Amino acid sequence: MKGMGNMGKMMKQVQKMQAEIQKLQAELGEKTVEATSGGGVVRVVANGKKELVDIVINPDAVDPDDVEMLQDLILAAANEALKQAEEMVAAEMAKITGGIKIPGMF
């Protein structure tokens, strides 16, 4: 019967971790990361839910004869912002899980 006490203790720890993860998910929607490209002419902000929340383009970067360059700058900044958001989420999750990878979480 001694093993049943350990099981109960483990279940409480899992429940606590689940509550902390739910709280973190809500908080991550408020946390943001920012990335720029083209020396700062394009700025993209993403949140911890890996959603783009803002894109700012310096008007000087808008050249009707070179739209392709602007598209590349936007993609570069957006991809970097999403990468940073992913890293932020992983770091925050590691604080809760102690680095254990939980399938299906983030």
Image (cartoon, helix red, strand yellow):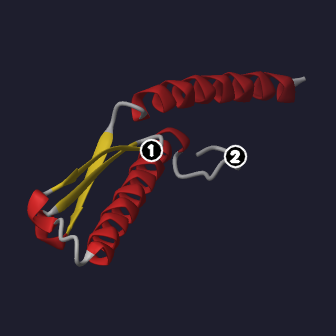
Residue 17: image quadrant is top right
* Secondary-structure class at tag 1: loop
Above or below, comparing residue 38 to residue 45 in the picture: below
Looking at the image, residue 37 sits to the left or right of residue 82; the answer is left
Q: Residue at x 70, y 50 (%)?
A: 103
> Disc 1 marks which amino acid?
Glu
* Secondary-structure class at tag 2: loop
Residue 16: image quadrant is top right
Give the image location of residue 70, x and y in percent. 27, 70
Q: Residue at x 29, y 72 (%)?
A: 67
- Is residue 39 or residue 92 the one in the foreground? 39
Residue at the front extreme of this rendering? 65
Residue 79: image quadrant is bottom left
- Is residue 84 or residue 36 the one in the foreground? 36
User: Residue at label 1?
Assistant: 51
The local crowd at label 1, few if under 14, some if 14 to 19, many if 20 or more residues have their Cα within 10 Å, is some
Give the image location of residue 47, x and y in percent. 38, 41
Quadrant of the frame with the N terminus: top right
Give the mark nearest the N terminus, 1 or 2: 1
Above or below, comparing residue 63 to residue 106 in the picture: below
> Disc 2 marks which amino acid?
Gly
User: Residue at label 2?
Assistant: 104
Residue 42 bears which disc, if any?
A: none
Q: Residue at x 80, y 28 (%)?
A: 7
The local crowd at label 2, few if under 14, some if 14 to 19, many if 20 or more residues have their Cα within 10 Å, is few
